[in-house]
Image (tube, rainbow, N blue to C red):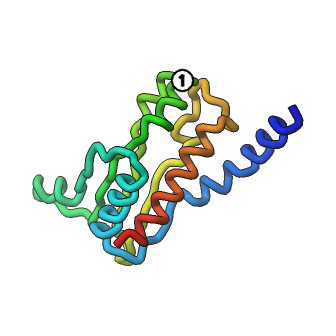
Amino acid sequence: MRFAMTAAVIGLCAAPLWAENMMKPSPLSVSETIDGLEAAVNGAGATVFARVDHAAGAESVGKSIPDATLLIFGNPALGTLAMEDDVRAGLMLPLRVLAYEDADGNTQMTWTPAEDLLAGLDIAPDAEVIGRINGALNMLTDKAMSAN
């Protein structure tokens, strides 16, 4: 009981820290960053479902936006944990990370932290799956910048 209470308190205190980490600068180009993220996802045994080049989509309709690519990926070991608590988590999964060129020409990576992604569902904010998803996103985005 004491361990569960300690874990719950740590989980609640850590949530704001993850929210602060939902954006990371990358020293690489958008394409290199997404290539690195894809390699990290594959190396972790997860599945890449799609790579969406938003800038190319804009170009296809005669528009122009800064370079922006979305990687959609998941791992059933984590996704299933969330869906066991609330099957509606399937609306928010798989996970997504966007790499884009900001107004200063720098590459940024951004994603939605698990506590925000799964908010409003029957998943406790201090559920183990929240920390595991955030940990995976943080680790994979770190590896994205060193995979090249």
The answer to whether 20 appears left or right of 12 in the picture is left
Total count of labels: 1
Q: Which of 138/29 is in front?
A: 138
Is residue 102 among what the camera can see?
Answer: no
The answer to whether 20 appears left or right of 97 in the picture is right
- For the residue labelled by badge 1, is the local secondary structure a helix, a strand or a loop? helix
Most extreme residue toward the right, as rendered?
2
Residue pointed to by mark 1 = 84
Image coordinates for residue 10, horizontal then vertical, percent = 77, 47
Q: Which quadrant of the rendered structure holds the N terminus?
A: top right
Image coordinates for residue 106, horizontal then vertical, percent = 39, 75
Q: Which of 9/62 is in front?
A: 9
- Residue visible at 54% across and 35% down in the picture: 118
- Residue visible at 40% across and 53% down in the picture: 97
- Residue visible at 71% across and 51% down in the picture: 14
Vertical comparison of 82 with 141: above or below: above
Image coordinates for residue 79, horizontal then vertical, percent = 47, 34
Q: Where on the picture, by quarter, is residue 107?
A: bottom left
Image coordinates for residue 113, horizontal then vertical, percent = 54, 48
Vertical comparison of 23 with 5: above or below: below
Q: Which of 27/116 is in front?
A: 27
- Are there few (<14), some (14-19), or many (20+) residues within 10 Å of tag 1? few
Is residue 47 among what the camera can see?
Answer: yes
- Residue visible at 74% across and 44% down in the picture: 12
The answer to whether 34 appears left or right of 7 in the picture is left
Q: Which quadrant of the rendered structure holds the C terminus?
A: bottom left
**Which amino acid type corresponds to the residue marked 1 in the rendered image?**
Glu
